[in-house]
Every structure is written in C-alpha cells, then in structure tokens.
Image: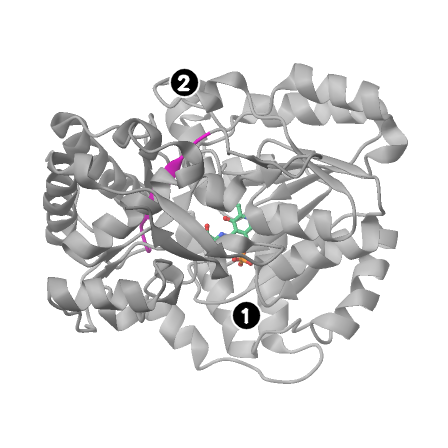
C-alpha cells in the first residue's frame, strides 16, 4: 500500500476551536503582535513548537503510574539512567528539567569569559547560555545550509574547514568543547550525516577538544542517516543513535522533543571530573542529581519515550506528515527550505515577502498573517530571533528569515494538515498586503519571547 497511516489510533481527544477573524485580530493586537503572548486556546492549530507538545502513548501513561518519587536513587531514576546509557553508551547521566538547564550547567561549569564554542548552529538558548558567561557562540554551518533551495541531504553538517580554521585562529585553550546540534533546528531542522560527525570528532581528537552533542532530535537525525547514508540502510535507528553518541564526550538533551515527553532533559558525559562539577552545580540549581528537577513519573515517561522515538514506523509516519505538507506547498509555489526538515516546515519569509526589508522583520509579518487568516500559530526564526548588534551598535539581520511550522508529535491528523495548506494558500495569494513591523520593546537576552511590535503602515 502507498498510503502511510498514523501508527496509532486515538484514545483521548482534546477539543480545539477556531475563534472568528475579528476575535483573532483583537487577540493579536492585545498580544502586541507577538504570538508568544496569545492565549493557547485562541490558537486553533498550534505549530509554535514541537517541544513538549506531543501526545503520550498508552505505554507512557501507564509508566507514569510506576513513578517512584523517592528523593534519591529511585527506581524510576534507574530506568531512566539505564535507557539513556543503552542509547548513548555515556557513563554519567544527570536528568534536568529541560534542555536549557543542561546547557546552563554545562556553560557555568566549563566556560569562562573569552572562550569560543563552535557548533553547526547554536539554538537560541544554547547561544544565550554561552554568551551569558561571556563566551562566544560560533556557527560553522556548511555552505549548503545557507542555500534554502539546495537539496543536499545533510544541510546540518559542520563546515570542517571553518572548524579547522576556528581552532587554529583561537587556539585549543580557548575552546573547552565543540558542539554539534542534531538535527540542526536553527538551519531548518536539517540533519547531520554520520560521516560529518565522525570527521568532526577526528578533527577535534587531533587537538584534544571534546565533542558535546545537542541531542534534542537525535532520533529524527538517526532516521535521516538511515534513509540517506547507504551504509546505514540495514541498521536499526537504535544502532545508528548508538554510533552517533559513540563519537560524543558529552551531550545535552531536551526530552521535550525526541524524548516524546512534555517536560524533561538530561546532561550526560564520560569524564569523571566534568560529572563531579555538574553534580555540584546540580544540587544548587536543579535538585539532587538522581531526579534533577523532574518527578519520578517524568523519568518513567522519558525512559519509554526515548525508545518510542527510535521506532522506525513512528519515524516513517512523522516524516510522511512533514513531507505531505511540503509537497503541497511546492505545488502552490510557496518558498520553503529544502529538503524538508525533520520536525517542521520552514517557510522562506524573505522570498515570500520580498517587499519587506529584513529589519522590518518579514518573518513576523508572515507569522501574524497566518494567525489572523487561519488561527494557526507558528514562529519566526529570523532577524528577531537570531539578529545581533555589531560593535557600533547597529542591528545586523540574521542570514535567513524563516518561519517555522513545527509539528507536535502524534497530535494532528491529515485533515489538520489540509486545513493548514488551505490557509497558507490564501496567505500566499494576498501576500502583497502583508506589512513589516517595528519593535517597540525588547529585553537584552532571547528577545523574541517577550519583545513587542507594531505594524508599519
Ligand atoms: N537545543 C535545541 C536544538 C532546541 O531546539 C531546543 C529547544 C533546546 C536546545 C532547548 O531545549 O526547550 O528543553 O530548554 N527548542 C524548542 C523549539 C524550544 O521550539 O525549537 P528546552
């Protein structure tokens, strides 16, 4: 059969409602044109993020009841530790309340002012945690990653030459570790090949620099390796993940993505000294290291979810939903990042709205119109999220202006996707009328979450 079906049936439902266009306009104005301030119940289809928004399986709900809420050394912790070790082979496992807590502890314990941390592309919280301690977060993405039309299958790869030059220029002492984000969320959810991970590790080994994987979407990355690197065709996703982690000295993880959980994360490492420093910081920030800011039932849920994310049928279905949307958009002529990423479709707002200059934030114009036209919430990944200020105090636009439609895991069905397509087609037809925006308030860090806008008439 050609039709790929959801490999589950629905046992519990949650009502959603489309409020009127007038109500949506009012809600957006009240939110000062930042969709992070909308009430979730005013968003009929919420594609703001795939983080913590998934539906749990029956196995996960059942596992919740087994939660051992002991403060230290609980049974749930043991299950969590064993599962993470089975997938990663990494010695020390510390649960965190979410991914950025792992990043925070890593940055606080290992970095000092003036250090330089290369990555294919840092996610915003990773960058912020690094910059918060006065270190520099460098993106060394391969050139294909900047070309939204390139069909190269591994556009999340690190540029090895740039990495080599970065080490030579800054010196080993300034680079306490290098990171790799799988898949590369910032660059369009694009995967990293095993060949690239291996080559990065080999290069770092020559200088004795540890590799830290940002593993949020490790299972989706494993799926792409399975599909697009012929030597992995006969391996299971678990085996592929195990090899990916075999090249890592440490990893940060948000279990809100490929842990198929609504909350949680971890920080793992092989080095005993790193682990000792992490544990000391943990007690101050997260909690005792065997629960680390999570309830025992969360640890249970994640232990099940991490393995479910590595189920091949689940990944086939997940990828099929994203591809379904991408293929329809392609037919309409809507510009988006190709090939289609693992967890989202990234619209190219610059090509969609060429009449809006980057510093009038075309991504915000598109996000807000998609909300008003269809009650669909999505997010800008462009100059608001990733723009920076240069030494003269001028705002520098981000290299790409993207709008992400991220797909919660196991939540929406094909008719929801058909509705999304219909809305986007209408937005595309009337795109000439979409305004740019100016910022009326912004905080110092992670401004996209809380800045306010007004449309430019
Ligand atoms: N790294 C990557 C690649 C991420 O995508 C995220 C979160 C994090 C780290 C931080 O994890 O949210 O658990 O603290 N990304 C979410 C998103 C927020 O919408 O893409 P967290």
Residue holding disc 2: 152
Image quadrant where residue 19 sits? bottom left
| Dot 1 crowding, Cα within 10 Å, few <14, some 14–19, many 20+ | many
Relative to residue 62, is residue 113 drawn left or right?
A: right
Determine the residue positioned at 79% across, 60% down. 278
Q: Residue at x 18, y 36 (%)?
A: 431
Query: Dot 2: what SS?
Result: loop
Q: Position of residue 380 (x, y in %)?
A: 39, 46
The label nearer to you, 2 versus 1, is 2
| Disc marking residue 299 | 1
The front one of 360 and 136 is 360
**Residue at 79% in and 47% down:** 134
Q: Quadrant of residue 207?
A: top right
How many C-alpha atoms fall within 10 Å of the one at disc 2: few (<14), some, or many (≥20)?
few
Q: Please tell me which of labels 2 and 1 falls first in the chain.
A: 2
Query: What is the magenta range?
Result: 400-408
């Amino acid at each position: 059969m050609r039709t790929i079906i959801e490999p589950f049936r629905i046992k519990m439902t949650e009502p959603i409602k489309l409020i009127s266009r007038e109500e949506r306009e009012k809600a957006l104005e009240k939110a000062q044109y930042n969709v992070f301030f909308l009430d979730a119940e005013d968003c009929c289809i919420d594609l703001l993020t795939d983080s913590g928004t998934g539906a749990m399986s029956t196995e996960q709900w059942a596992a919740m009841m087994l939660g051992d809420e002991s403060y230290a050394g609980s049974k749930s912790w043991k299950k969590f530790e064993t599962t993470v070790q089975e997938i990663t082979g990494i010695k020390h496992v510390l649960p965190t309340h979410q991914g950025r807590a792992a990043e925070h502890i890593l940055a606080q314990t290992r970095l000092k002012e003036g250090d330089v941390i290369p990555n294919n592309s840092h996610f915003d919280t990773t960058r912020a945690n690094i910059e918060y301690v006065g270190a520099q977060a460098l993106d060394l993405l391969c050139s294909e990653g900047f070309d939204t039309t390139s069909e190269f299958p591994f556009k999340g790869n690190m540029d090895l030459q740039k990495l080599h030059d970065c080490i030579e220029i800054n010196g080993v002492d300034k680079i306490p570790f290098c990171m790799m984000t799988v898949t590369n969320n910032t660059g369009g959810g694009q995967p990293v090949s095993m060949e690239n991970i291996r080559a990065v590790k080999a290069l770092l080994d020559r200088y004795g620099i540890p590799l830290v994987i940002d593993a949020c979407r490790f299972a989706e990355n494993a799926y792409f390796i399975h599909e697009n690197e012929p030597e992995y065709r006969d391996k299971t996703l678990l085996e592929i993940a195990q090899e990916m982690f075999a090249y890592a000295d440490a990893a940060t993880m948000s279990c809100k993505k490929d842990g198929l959980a609504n909350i949680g994360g971890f920080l793992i490492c092989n080095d005993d000294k790193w682990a000792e420093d992490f544990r000391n910081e943990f007690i101050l920030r997260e909690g005792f290291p065997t629960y680390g800011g999570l309830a025992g039932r969360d640890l249970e849920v994640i232990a099940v979810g991490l393995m479910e994310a590595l189920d091949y049928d689940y990944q086939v279905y997940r990828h099929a939903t994203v591809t379904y949307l991408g293929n329809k958009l392609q037919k309409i002529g809507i510009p988006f990042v190709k090939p289609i990423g693992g967890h989202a479709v990234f619209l190219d707002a610059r090509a969609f709205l060429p009449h809006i200059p980057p510093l009038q934030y075309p991504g915000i114009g598109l996000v807000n119109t998609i909300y008003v036209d269809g009650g669909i919430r999505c997010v800008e990944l462009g100059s608001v999220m990733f723009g920076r200020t240069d030494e003269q105090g001028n705002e520098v636009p981000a290299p790409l202006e993207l709008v992400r439609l991220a797909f919660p895991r196991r939540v929406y069905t094909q008719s929801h996707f058909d509705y999304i397509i219909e809305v986007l087609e209408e937005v595309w037809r009337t795109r000439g009328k979409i305004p740019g925006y100016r910022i009326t308030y912004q905080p110092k860090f992670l401004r996209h979450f809380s800045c306010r806008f007004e449309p430019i008439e």
